[in-house]
Amino acid sequence: MKKTKYVFVTGGVTSSLGKGIIAASLAKLLQKRGYSVTIQKLDPYINIDPGTLNPYEHGECFVTDDGAETDLDLGHYERFLNIPTSQANNVTTGRIYQSVINKERKGEFLGKTVQIIPHITDEIKHRIQLLGNTGEYDIVITEIGGTIGDIESLPYVESVRQLLWELGHENAVSIHLTLIPYLAAAGELKTKPTQHSVKMLMQSGVTPDILVCRTEHKLNDGIKRKLALFCNVQQDAIIESLDAETIYDVPNMMLEEKLDEVVLKKMNLPIDEKPDLKVWNTFVTKHKNPKNTIEIGLIGKYVELHDAYKSIAESFIHAGSSNEVKVNIQWIHSNKLTPDNIPSKLKNLDGILVAPGFGDRGIEGKIDAVKYARENKVPFLGICLGMQMAVIEFSRNVLGLKDAFSTEMNPNTPHPVINLMEAQKSVVDKGGTMRLGAWKCQLAEGSKVKSIYKKEIIEERHRHRYEFNNEYLDQIEKAGLIATGKNPDTNLVEIIELKDHPWFVGVQYHPEYKSTVLSPHPLFVDFVKAALEHSLK
């Protein structure tokens, strides 16, 4: 079995510096040098997973093939590396404590007092090394959530300290991402916040091997020498990370700064020829040099926080590049849409996407947006709840079932065209109990989706409790809304298409979770293409 090496990425001074993007960019460079790499995220919150968190709290909840509800950074990992992640790639404090407490209840600690050290830290170290122990990866990159100095991050930092000592210097490397702020009044970059952050990290027993410095202005040699002197870091291991035009520029910027070479040197691994980023850069070039521009309306209920729809936004970047189109997303709050203002708010759109979500807030606005797209022949994509809204709108306005609804919003509706899944009716706990992960879907002959996917059976990721009510299937299909994708085992309707419409598709699953730089999702690619054709009419 190969000896796996570990890279730990911590953050200091402030949150939201982009640890996930730096980790993903480093992983991409190492991958293109021929190393097998994966990334995992350690989240310090006590929730078991982000599945029950409001999107305003934590942004999007990303779902893996094996049904894990995870941090949105795993989406970045997949989009950059083009390989799927799993339950093992995301660890939370809640999961750690739950595991240790379960072991204590079973008597596995032989009556000993259960403590942070060694029991919690041993569990963290075990989780960190799970992926490495498979023998599948040369390098495992571990991103530690939060900021150095946070109380909740301390057990993770202590676990990193122990692993750095146990694994040895050549087998484990510590990267600290920090901020070098620019004071406009003084006209200077200031290193003091970074010095304090490194000092705090060293007080926890971890000395960073590499500093990655987020900055608005280039670091001169004087600043690098000062950082090296005060932070105990070699000068060639101080990496400048300037603000980027797009996150997809960061791998090239880190290549120029030789971050991957510094990491490989410290781990005594061969440094061959430069990574081949030709395909990656073709994508970036197309993304930055579009031939056309289209306007897509994203109709959602959490639009104030764009991270709530992170994978959808990135999928449009991938599909836009593929079509050499700039996709301008107009973030439209469904709660503010009414039948009176919809024509003026949506008239300039080339495509309409009704986004996923939960609960009854803003639902009527979504339904009205679907109606506008259907009646005005605007390309439409409904995802999860968006697909369900399309079924409700059609049932109300075409079939004449005026009170048609989902039992999620109205348990007493006389026409429950969307109903709670049978398997969900006895479920009480909310966390981790939805229909999650990858499920098969069989595509109908002659359908638009089959021509898009060019396959008969697809597998897509799900996150829902409610489903299309098959009792209404016959009358809905006779009226022109066709079920063109079904689960082959349960007959659950996964995809609906509208006849006599240029592009109208609703999907129960989340295609955005599987779109990557190198494999843009075909559904988004074709939707963007249809929106472009609509714009050129």
Image (cartoon, helix red, strand yellow):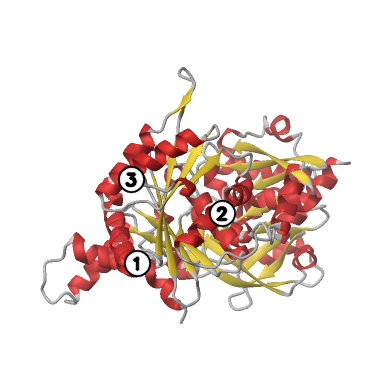
Separation (CA) of disc 3 from disc 2: 22 Å
Q: Nearer the viewer, mark 1 or mark 2?
A: 1
- Residue at the far bottom in the pictured view: 1
Q: Position of residue 53 (x, y in %)?
A: 41, 50
Residue at image position (45%, 19%) is 186
Residue 505 shows up from this direction: no
Q: Position of residue 323 (x, y in %)?
A: 79, 51
| Mark 1, residue position | 168
State which tag comes first along the sequence, 1 or 2. 2
Image position of 432 (left or right of 366): left
The kind of residue on which mark 3 rests is: Ile
Q: Position of residue 296 (x, y in %)?
A: 71, 42
Label 1 crowd bin: few (<14), some (14–19), many (20+), radius 10 Å: few
- Residue at the far top in the pictured view: 185
State which tag comes first along the sequence, 3 or 1. 3
Residue 445 shows up from this direction: yes
Q: Nearer the viewer, mark 3 or mark 1?
A: 1
| Mark 3, residue position | 148
Q: Relative to residue 115, is residue 237 depicted above or below?
A: above
Q: Relative to residue 228, is residue 522 depicted above or below?
A: below
Label 3 crowd bin: few (<14), some (14–19), many (20+), radius 10 Å: many
Q: Position of residue 63 (x, y in %)?
A: 51, 61
Image position of 462 (left or right of 339): left
Residue at image position (45%, 31%) is 181
State which tag comes first along the sequence, 3 or 2. 2
Separation (CA) of disc 3 from disc 1: 23 Å
> Camera-side residue: 200 or 113?
200
Q: Which mark is residue 25?
A: 2
Separation (CA) of disc 1 from disc 2: 25 Å
The kind of residue on which mark 2 rests is: Ser
